[in-house]
Amino acid sequence: MKLIISGATGFVGREVLRQSLSRSEITSVVALARKPISAPENTDASKLKSIVIDDYEHYSEEVKKEFAGASACIWPVAITPSQSTAYEFAEVKRVCQTSTISALKAMHESGVSQPFRFLYVSGALAERDQTKTPKFRPEYSLMRGETETKLLALSTELAGIETCIVRPGYITAPGDIMKTIAGTVVQLTVGTPSISVVDLATVMLNEVVNGFDKELLLPGDLVAKIPKNK
């Protein structure tokens, strides 16, 4: 299968890229980023097509040609809650919502395979009910929930699109003690299980390769899907 990965130089995207290039089911990878990407060590570089884009909201005809025939996309691009305070909210919404919607439309227009599986990485505290006022960064949480709703509606509107939304808890990294501690604190205080970026990437790749069984995967669902024999 041909897989599209957005934000391939980011924390989550890098790990998805590394694993995808080592999986036999995935024959080619279109990696979107703002700078050129090289294949990680000990992976099959022949599968990788690095695409440099200036903006995740706009796609040239040349880029759309690279999307053609793809079977799935994993979309982790976002401005995180902690990063969001450094930007005007309009820019946060543009990156997290407008760009994601534009990307899915562009992929559909390019002639992707059907069904085309689009996996969107949302946030653990996303709230779809716009009448509620979340306790944590309410404007941000409501926007992420609204993005989920818009993506699901667009998927229904567009022929052959299947969408799955994942809401991971705190994402840890192997060897990063501070992230491990932070993940433990979040789990103890909020009750939301953390997940390592390695396990998250594995679960998401399994989902796009094997097919979606749910349209929403909460933190506990993601942990439950971590392979036991890894």
Image (cartoon, helix red, strand yellow):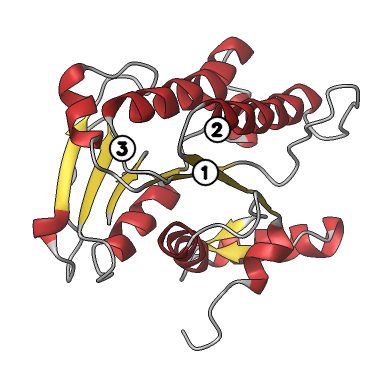
Q: Are marks 2 and 3 in contact (CB under 8 Å)?
A: no
Left or right relative to 28: residue 172: right
Left or right relative to 18: residue 13: right
Q: Which residue is mark 2?
A: 155
Q: Is residue 38 visible?
A: no
Residue furthest bottom in the image: 229
Residue at (61, 41) in percent of width and height: 122
- Circle 2 SS class: helix
Q: Are marks 1 and 2 in contact (CB under 8 Å)?
A: yes
Q: Residues within 10 Å of mark 3 (few under 14, many from 20)?
A: many
Where on the picture, by quarter, is residue 41? bottom left
Q: Residues within 10 Å of mark 2 (few under 14, many from 20)?
A: many
Mark before the other along the chain sequence, 3 or 1: 3
- Return the residue nearer the eye: 217 or 19: 217
Q: Residues within 10 Å of mark 1 (few under 14, many from 20)?
A: many
Spatial CA distance of label 2 from label 3 is 13 Å
- Return the residue nearer the eye: 209 or 79: 209
Q: Which residue is mark 3?
A: 112
Q: Amino acid at mark 2?
A: Ser
Residue 78 coordinates in the image, percent (x, y):
51, 33
Where on the picture, by quarter, is residue 82? top right
- Circle 1 SS class: strand
Residue 73 coordinates in the image, percent (x, y):
39, 44
Residue at (46, 84) in percent of width and height: 230
Q: Amino acid at mark 3?
A: Val
Q: Which residue is mark 1?
A: 162
Q: Amino acid at mark 1?
A: Glu
Mark before the other along the chain sequence, 1 or 2: 2
